[in-house]
Amino acid sequence: MKILIVEDDFISRRIIKDILSPYGDCDIVVDGMEAVQAFKLAYEANEPYSLICMDIMMPNLDGHEALQQIRDIEKNSGIKGSAEVKVIMITALDDPKTVFKAYYKGGATSYIVKPIEKNKLIQEIRGLGLIS
């Protein structure tokens, strides 16, 4: 499995990478602009990501905007439904407005509130059918 971790906080990046590296190859970027670029490059190389774990609050381009651009790339390429990359939004914000925006407007597959717990993240990935 190919995984993209999008997180501006060093400690959070490290925790997510430590949790996910046994399950696949992890690429790490620090903001939404890099996330969109990494997604495009992987898609163009015919090596798309299976999973993106993305923070919402980041500099330059936040997670909502980056996810929207990624979903637009997929839509313009004819990728839809279950063929879309699975995206877990990760944030310190647990308010209903943020959750609604991530799921219904942004097209997130799942949502996790920080602090990141190993069992919760693994359970989410298992629920997405990416690991057994």
Image: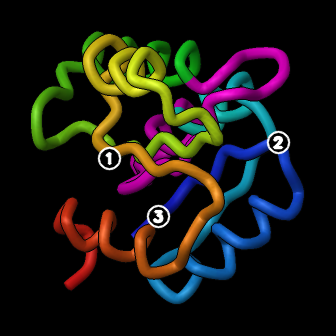
Q: Quadrant of residue 50?
A: bottom left
Crowd around label 2: few <14 · some 14–19 · many ≥20 (10 Å): some
Count of numbered badges drawn on the protein: 3
Secondary structure of residue under mark 3: strand
Gap in Å between the C-alphas at discs 1 and 2? 20 Å
Q: Which mark is residue 8?
A: 2
Q: Secondary structure at mark 2?
A: loop
**Does label 3 or label 2 sit earlier along the sequence?**
3
Mark 1 and mark 3 lie on one chain; the one further toward the N terminus is 3
Judge whether 92 appears above or below 120 on screen: above
**Decide: marks 3, 2 in contact (CB < 8 A)?**
no
- At 39% across and 27% down in the image, what residue appears? 99
Q: Nearer the viewer, residue 107 or 70?
A: 107
Stretch of the chain drawn in magenta: 40-63
Q: Quadrant of the C terminus?
A: bottom left
x 82%, y 42%: residue: 8
Extreme left residue here? 81
**In this picture, is 112 found above or below 61?**
below
Which residue is drawn at the image coordinates 62% and 30% (left, top)? 56
Q: Which residue is mark 1?
A: 86
Judge by depth and name the residue closer to the eye, 47 or 81: 81
In the picture, measured across the screen, residue 29 lies left or right of residue 11, that is left
Q: Is residue 51 left or right of residue 129?
A: right
Residue 54: percent from left, percent from top: 57, 42
